[in-house]
Image (spheres, helix red, strand yellow):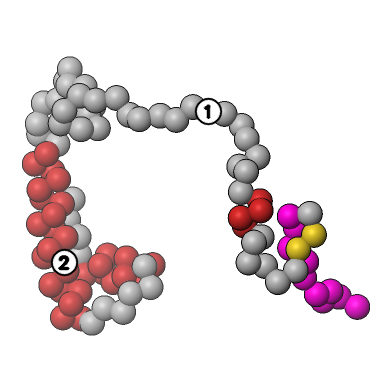
Amino acid sequence: MSVDLQTVKRVAHLARIAVTNEDAERMTGELNAILGFVEQLNEVDVTGVEPMTSVTPMEMKKRADIVTDGGKAGDIVANAPATDENFFLVPKVVE
């Protein structure tokens, strides 16, 4: 796959990035080099290779899946100027 100047400008537009013509030409070469490297990776035979999340085998740390109320309601509203039964009280904005 090859990236041309038109593609670089379109991607920059979609990403809302201002790119000058000189930058777009430079990026064209850089993106083609990156895509060339990725195409080299496609040539590697990985049949029978398990996907890895780390180079050393380990189990992910997991917490117990317990439903609680959090016990933080009092801490959350502690600095609020006005509260009532752990709810924030705010001025009425609709008349």
Between residue 2 and residue 23, name the one nearer to us: 23
Q: Residue shown at 66%/51% (left/top)?
A: 73
Q: Residue shown at 25%/67% (left/top)?
A: 8
How would you rate the neighbour count of disc 1 (Cα within 10 Å): few for under 14, some for 14-19, many for 20 or more?
A: few
Secondary structure found at label 2: helix
Q: Position of residue 53 (x, y in %)?
A: 24, 32
Residue 95: image tag: none
- The magenta span reads 86-95
Q: Residue 60 colored magenta?
A: no
Q: Position of residue 54 (x, y in %)?
A: 20, 32
Residue sitting farthest toward the right? 95
- Say if 83 sits above or below 61 in the image: below
Q: Residue shown at 15%/31% (left/top)?
A: 55
Circle 1 sits on which residue?
Answer: 65
Circle 2 sits on which residue?
Answer: 28
Kindly indicate the quadrant of the structure image that contains residue 83: bottom right
Between residue 85 and residue 59, name the one nearer to us: 85
Between residue 95 and residue 26, name the one nearer to us: 95
Name the amino acid, label 2: Thr
In the shown orientation, is residue 77 left or right of residue 5? Answer: right
Between residue 36 and residue 93, name the one nearer to us: 93
Kindly indicate the quadrant of the structure image that contains residue 68: top right
Q: Main secondary structure of the magenta part?
A: loop
How would you rate the neighbour count of disc 2 (Cα within 10 Å): few for under 14, some for 14-19, many for 20 or more?
A: some
Q: Position of residue 14 (x, y in %)?
A: 38, 67
Name the amino acid, label 1: Asp
Q: Position of residue 50 (x, y in %)?
A: 21, 22
- Say if 49 sits above or below 3 in the image: above
Q: Quadrant of the C terminus?
A: bottom right
In the shown orientation, is residue 60 left or right of residue 36? Answer: right
Q: Earlier in the sequence, mark 1 or mark 2?
A: 2
Kindly indicate the quadrant of the structure image that contains residue 45: top left
